[in-house]
Image (cartoon, rainbow, N blue to C red):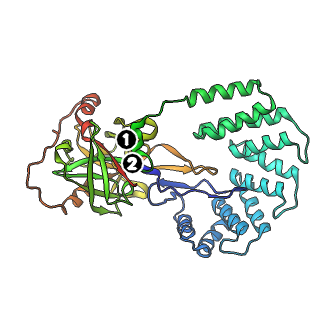
Amino acid sequence: MGLITQIRRPLLNSAIILGLLLPINVYAKPLAPSDQQFTQGWEAYDQGKYSEAMKIWEPLARQGNTDAQINLGVMYDYGKGVAENHAMAAQWYQRAAKQGHKSAQFNLGQMYLQGRGVEQDIRQAIHWLKQAAQQGFAIAQYNLGVLYTEGKRMPVEHNKAVKWFYLAGLAYLQTGNVDKSRESLQAIQRISPDHSRAVELQAKLTTYAPQAEHDASLDIFANKSSGTAWPIAHGYAVTNNHVVADSNEVTLINTAGDSIHARVVLRDKQNDLALLSVIELDKMPPALPLSGNHARLGATVFTIGYPRIDIMGKTPKLTDGIISSVNGLRGDRSNYQISVPVQPGNSGGPLLNMKGEVVGIVTSMLGTTDDRTGTTTLLPNISFALKVDVLKALMEKLPQAQQPLTELASQGDNLEGLAARIQESVMIVLAGQ
């Protein structure tokens, strides 16, 4: 949902982790800040053009790019764009593993364990699994626990098994994977129900994920993409196009809880904007004023939106920061880089100055994908907002309003005062079935 609906996930298989830590702009289009060529390989792979992806990644892999090396290993391992060749897969995994890439170390360990492409060797398997585990790679930690518990081709060592299951539980919990963390706890309990590590992990799980009563009012959000929208003109609102990319009919929800039917009438896919037309004008809050000036480097800015409504609830949330750069990723002059913390669901929200004027539209975050689950780890204090000038240009394509626009005043205040004035003009937008 929201900002992370289109992230590039690792290549996965039930037996082996087939993936990598890919630097991306968490957005509808994948961006690799260090290597645009590598991203082109992803685009080809996603389209099923495996041979083309191979041609792009192989030169990078030979130059030492570990992400490309892992993906070549995947393609040789499972015959994607090339004849299946486990020995070649192991060679590419080993190149990345020797450079310290934890998913490659895990893959290589699994190949030694299974005798895929290499001679089966439990010592080598343990060596490479430990290399990955010592970097906090949860599945490697868990698999080590299993190996020391089962004792296949090696002695049973319950103390070591408990240690690795415990570390796996902590690592899974750090990424929010509560189910896998519980599996790790249960593995410890099967060895020793009252073990101190089991008690510690149980306590952390209880603190992290207490049982909560079901909130039926959140059912409306199930299976929907969500983001933030706000009024811009008489009968119109704006959000990010990636929030409503697969829908022409969407629902807006104001702070009173009213559902408002809206239709997408204009899309700017390049700049990730969508303009929404609303008929039920009596339910629409006042529009937000658009700034006539660019925000300066270091200026204080904030956003109000609806991040992670499935977890954080459906009341508006405010976060603030500064303009970190007057240009976006790779010097993009149509965007600001901001230090404002944002989450999935903030997509489309207004970026405001201390007069309550909109200077930009929150669009994306910078982060990395988790090798095992595809979970995004955000890089702290690095987000992006489209400059309001782009929105103004798009608004010129709207029909001229026949009625006067109700708009909030532009007036300086502290954050508390600004929030009180602005929050009712910020709405949830839901798209999908």
Q: Which mark is residue 306?
A: 1
> How many C-alpha atoms fall within 10 Å of the one at disc 1: few (<14), some, or many (≥20)?
many
Q: Position of residue 330 (x, y in %)?
A: 43, 58
Work out how far the residue at label 2 is from the one at label 1, CA to CA, in angstroms.
Answer: 8 Å
Task: Name the residue: 69% across, 53% down.
Answer: 103
Question: Of marks 2 and 1, which one's residue comes earlier in the chain?
Answer: 2
Q: Is residue 328 left or right of residue 136?
A: left
Task: Name the residue: 19% across, 63% down.
Answer: 397
Of 196 and 432, nearer the camera is: 432
At numbered mark 2, what does the secondary structure look like: helix, strand or loop? Answer: strand
Q: Position of residue 283 (x, y in %)?
A: 20, 43
Of 36 and 394, nearer the camera is: 394
Task: Name the residue: 23% across, 39% down.
Answer: 356
| Nearer to us: label 2 or label 1 | 2
Q: Are marks 2 and 1 in contact (CB under 8 Å)?
A: yes
Of 204 and 103, nearer the camera is: 204
Q: Which mark is residue 115?
A: none
Figure quadrant of residue 313: top left
Figure quadrant of residue 141: top right
Mark 2: amino acid: Ser
Compared with 93, 169 (above or below) is: above
Q: Is residue 60 left or right of residue 141?
A: left
How many marks do you count on the picture?
A: 2
Q: Is residue 101 visible?
A: no
At numbered mark 1, what does the secondary structure look like: helix, strand or loop? Answer: loop
Figure quadrant of residue 52: bottom right
- Give the labeled residue for mark 2: 226
Mark 1: amino acid: Tyr
Q: Is residue 72 visible?
A: yes
